[in-house]
Image (cartoon, rainbow, N blue to C red):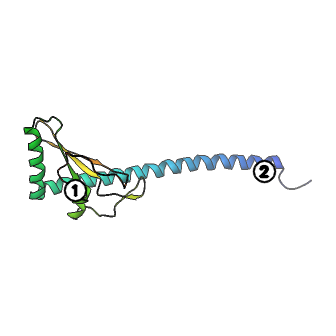
Amino acid sequence: MKKGYTLVELLAVIVVLSIILSIVSINVLKYYNSRRQNDYNNIVSITIENAKVLVNTNTKISNLVNDNLQKKEENGETNIFCNLSYGELVKAKLMDKDTKNPLNNKIIDSKSYIKITVDSDYNYGYEFIYVDDEDAAYSDSDDCLYVE
C-alpha cells in the first residue's frame, strides 16, 4: 500500500484553495475601497466645517461672501452662490496644503473649492467641489474668492 496523495486529490485541494483565495481577495478589495471612500467623505466633511468656520470668523471673508451673494440677489439671479477656494482654507491654516485625496492619492489642489449657496431664507449651503485635473484652469466667472 502506497502512502501519499493522488494527483486528483492535490488538484481538488488547489481548486478549493483558489476559490477561498478569490472570495477573500474580493472582500478585502471591497473593504479597502470602502475605507478609502469613508476617508474621502471625512476629508470633505472637515473641509466644509472649516469653510464654515472661516466664513463665520473671518470678517473680511465673511463680508466678501455676503457682498457677492447680495450683489447676485440684487441682479435678480436665481442661482446665488459664491466659491471659496481650498487655497483660502490652507492660507488660513485650517487645512494642510499637502492633504491627499484618498481616492486617487493626489494632493488636493487649491483649484478645488467650496461652493457656498444661499436659499430664500438666507440659509447657507456648502458643497465641496474637488478639481482632479492639475492643469484645469479655474474658469467660473461667478467666483468670489479664488487664490492660486
Identify which residue is drawn at 38% across, 50% down: 38
Q: Quadrant of residue 125?
A: top left
Q: CA distance from mark 2 to mark 1?
A: 59 Å
Label 1, residues with CA under 10 Å away: few <14, some 14-19, many ≥20 = some
Q: Secondary structure at mark 1?
A: helix
Residue 10's disc is 2
Q: Considering depth in this image, is 68 or 130 the residue closer to the camera?
A: 68
Which amino acid lies under the numbered mark 1 shown in the image of this protein? Asn
Q: Residue at x 62, y 50 (%)?
A: 21
Give the camera-side residue of 111 and 5: 111
**Left or right for 44, reference 77:** right
Q: Is residue 17 left or right of residue 56?
A: right
Please give the label number shown on residue 50. 1
Along the polypeptide, which appears first: circle 2 or circle 1? 2
Q: Residues within 10 Å of mark 2 (few under 14, many from 20)?
A: few
* SS of the residue under disc 2: helix
Q: Picture coordinates of residue 82 (x, y %)?
A: 18, 46
Q: Amino acid at mark 2?
A: Leu
